[in-house]
């Protein structure tokens, strides 16, 4: 729990610092006749490593996203026998994100684990302003997961509703400079299909993520989600770990390509938040990658360059 306290204190200090500058910035804007503008692209992509970022798709933009997680690099199930995990695919994902408006995105995807289909909506409620009149971004995220595979035993899905899970999250971010952006993500997962009978069907989570720009097209990204120590019982037969991932994000025109290392076997929040069973300290880290390709389906009549997507 000390780690959680330190992370919360750090984020609070950042927010307090932003609030301390707010009044002074507003006075300067009024004196100079300046108009507050929205700070775009706190993050380069709509995702970080495992978690979502606060970004949404621009209107009529379609993002095709392919993600791949391999097996353990080390430990009992890794090493040269599996080519350090490259022989084993723990999860595969393909999905589409579409911008209904600049602030509202809908998405559909399918992952290998549990043959899970996900349907989600993402709405940017608050936008950070250049004069600190609004010091943060806030995006609301909701996702439905549907398990399509056959049951492992006759009693696994007693009711059809047991195939569904629901995830709700508030993503609060701030762009501190042109190089550094951070976010915090409180979330709540509701599910019926649990692997350990003693585990809770409802789980709270608290995520942290960041992006540090290294060069014009290269950034370091990381995210960490706290699950254990919140609403999850401690005396479980299975051992679960908090998901943690780091990566390098590369922009190549209309593509975003990221090379990642994480301890989670799975890709979608409805799976990786409750079911991460691998540990960084025990060789459970794995390599993964994400390819994102953005398409504009309808050419905008507005040719103002300031209205173009700042994400891609």
Image (tube, rainbow, N blue to C red):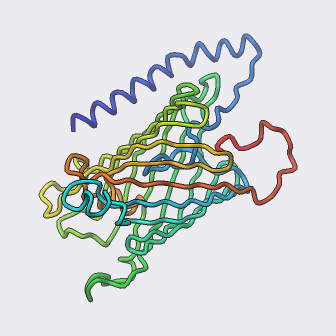
Q: Residue at x 84, y 39 (%)?
A: 304
**Left or right: where 59 falls relative to 75:** right
**Left or right: where 11 falls relative to 123:** left
In the rendered view, would you say 290 is above or below 217? below
In the rendered view, would you say 190 is above or below 129? below
The spot of residue 73 in percent (x, y) is 29, 54
The spot of residue 213 in percent (x, y) is 53, 32
Between 204 and 182, which is closer to the camera in this rendering?
182
Between 180 and 233, which is closer to the camera in this rendering?
180
Q: How many numbered marks are there?
A: 0
The spot of residue 269 in percent (x, y) is 41, 58
Q: Residue at x 74, y 23 (%)?
A: 35
User: The C terminus lies in which quarter of the figure?
Assistant: top right
**Left or right: where 142 falls relative to 192:** right
The spot of residue 8 in percent (x, y) is 34, 33
Q: Residue at x 33, y 55 (%)?
A: 264
Task: Tell which residue pokes out farthest to the bottom in this image.
Answer: 154
When asked about the image quadrant of residue 157, the answer is bottom left
**Left or right: where 265 falls relative to 45:** left
User: The N terminus lies in which quarter of the figure?
Assistant: top left
């Amino acid at each position: 729990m000390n780690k959680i306290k330190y992370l919360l204190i750090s984020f609070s200090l950042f927010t307090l610092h932003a609030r301390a500058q707010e009044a002074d910035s507003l006075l300067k804007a009024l004196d100079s006749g300046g108009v507050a503008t929205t700070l775009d692209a706190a993050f380069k992509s709509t995702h970080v490593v495992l978690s979502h970022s606060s970004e949404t798709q621009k209107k009529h933009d379609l993002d095709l996203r392919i993600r791949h997680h391999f097996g353990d690099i080390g430990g009992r199930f890794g090493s040269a026998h599996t080519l350090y995990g490259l022989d084993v695919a723990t999860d595969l994902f393909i999905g589409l994100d579409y911008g209904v408006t600049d602030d509202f995105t809908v998405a559909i995807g399918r992952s290998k684990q549990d043959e899970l289909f996900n349907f989600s909506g993402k709405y940017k409620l608050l936008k950070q302003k250049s004069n600190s009149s609004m010091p943060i971004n806030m995006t609301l995220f909701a996702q439905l997961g549907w398990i399509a595979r056959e049951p492992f035993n006759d009693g696994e899905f007693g009711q059809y509703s047991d195939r569904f899970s629901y995830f709700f999250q508030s993503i609060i971010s701030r762009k501190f400079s042109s190089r550094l952006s951070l976010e915090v993500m409180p979330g709540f997962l509701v599910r019926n299909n649990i692997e350990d009978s003693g585990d809770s069907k409802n789980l709270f989570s608290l995520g942290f993520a960041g992006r540090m720009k290294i060069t014009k097209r290269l950034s370091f990204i990381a995210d960490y989600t706290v699950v254990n120590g919140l609403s999850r019982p401690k005396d479980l037969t299975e051992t679960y770990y908090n998901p943690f991932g780091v990566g390098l994000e590369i922009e190549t025109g209309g593509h975003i390509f990221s090379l990642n290392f994480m301890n989670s076997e799975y890709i979608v929040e409805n799976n990786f938040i409750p079911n991460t069973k691998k540990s960084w300290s025990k060789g459970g880290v794995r390599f993964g990658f994400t390819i994102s390709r953005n398409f504009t389906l309808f050419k905008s009549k507005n040719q103002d360059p300031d209205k173009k997507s700042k994400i891609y």
